[in-house]
Every structure is written in structure tokens, then in C-alpha cells.
Amino acid sequence: IFSNNMAELIRLYDKNNSQSMLDEIVKALDKDAVIIYKTDTMYALGCHINSTKAVNRICEIKGIQASKNRFSFICADLSSIANYAKVSDFAFKTLKRYLPGAYTFVLPASSNVPSILVQGKKTVGIRIPDYQPILSIVELLGSPLLTTSLPQEDLELEDYTDPSLIFDQLGHAVDLILDGGLGGYTPSSVIEIKEDEFEIIREGAGDCSDFN
């Protein structure tokens, strides 16, 4: 997978993906791969959350510093969130109601979150997108997948919704691009849960009317 300078483009279907293909993606993630993949909102950059090497590469691609950015990651299901975040009863009821969906919920981070992703920040963003192929990959991986938006400087809207154009723009910088067809262009809504209150950090694709 890493022998040439361009990413491998893999077609990912909404269902009935071959086990061998999913295994190949997971194997690459275990070997520090950086991937681009579709979610229920936009295409995203991602890697295994325990791969410091891959996290640093993503920071380079985006021109950001890990210490100054809040990262989010995708969990396979509600039960796995509690390994990485402190989930109160109020928070759990909220997550159960709105996930899977186009939301990122910001919760207090647990000690299991790799230090490169928190670096003094006490919270972490959690996603369970309503998009089964990526949840299947995360489940097989047995660990959350870092998720962050594509670098958008110098990109036209089509460049980060159409996987073939994403390949042209970023194929040199990543290892795999999972082509799930056209993606969206509105990011997830970001909601911080503080005790029994909500704070809307960003209004996006998920309906925020219940959180006001």
C-alpha cells in the first residue's frame, strides 16, 4: 500500500463490502496509514488514534499543531464511548437519542485518550456517523478512528465532495482514499455536554433546535 507515492483508491459501498477489502483497510490503519473517507456529513481525514506518526502526518497535511487543535474521533457504538470519555447518565441519554447521526458531542476525556490528542485539553469530540461502512471499519479496527475535516485552503467545493477530485488534490499526501460516492459539504453539528446542559459550539448538518 505504501510502496508508491499516490494513494490507493478503494471503492466502498453502502453495504455488502467484501471482508477482504475491509481487512485490507484495517491492516493499513494498523500500520500508521492516513486515509480519506466518507461520513454521513463530509469526507474526512483519519487514522488510528494510537498512531502518533499518522496523527503528526495529518497535522502536516492540514498545517496545524496538535497542541492547538481539538480532535474528534469515531467510535463504533455507544458502549465503546465510555472507554474514551466520561459519560454521565444525562450525556448517555443524549447520545442514545441522537447517535448515530450528524453530531459531534464534546465530553470530558478519559485517561485512555492518547496524550497527543488532548495535550492539556480536558475534553474530546465523539462521533458515531450514520454511515455503516465506516462504523464496520472502526469495529474491525477495535479502536476509534481520528476524524478531521480535509484541508480547505485553495480547494473548490467540488474538490472535497467528489472522491476523484479529492484524489487529484490529496492523493499524494495520504495512503488510502475510500470512494463512497459524492459526499456532503456541511460539517457535523458540535454540541458540548456540560453536566446537564448543552452548549452549541457549531451549527452544522445535525438539527440543533433541541439544544438551544
Image (tube, grey):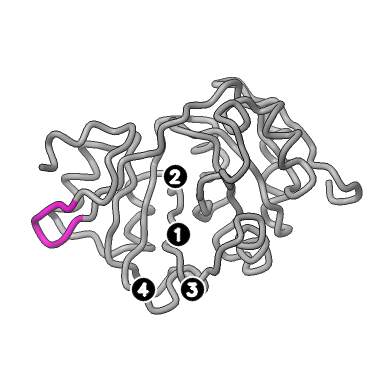
Residue most toward the bottom?
120
The three-letter amino acid code for the residue at tag 3 is Ser
Tag 2 residue: 76
Tag 4 residue: 121
Q: CA distance from mark 3 to mark 1?
A: 10 Å
The three-letter amino acid code for the residue at tag 1 is Phe
Q: Which residues are magenta?
A: 193-199
Tag 1 residue: 71
Picture layout, residue 137 above or below residue 143? above
Left or right, 89 with respect to 22, comes to: left
Picture layout, residue 34 above or below residue 10? below
Picture layout, residue 161 above or below residue 212? above
Name which of mark 2 and mark 3 comes first in the sequence. 3
The three-letter amino acid code for the residue at tag 2 is Ala
Q: Point out the image quarter for the C terminus.
A: top left
Looking at the image, do the residues carrying marks 1 and 2 touch, with CB atoms under 8 Å apart?
no
Looking at the image, do the residues carrying marks 4 and 2 touch, with CB atoms under 8 Å apart?
no
Q: Residues within 10 Å of mark 1 (few under 14, many from 20)?
A: many
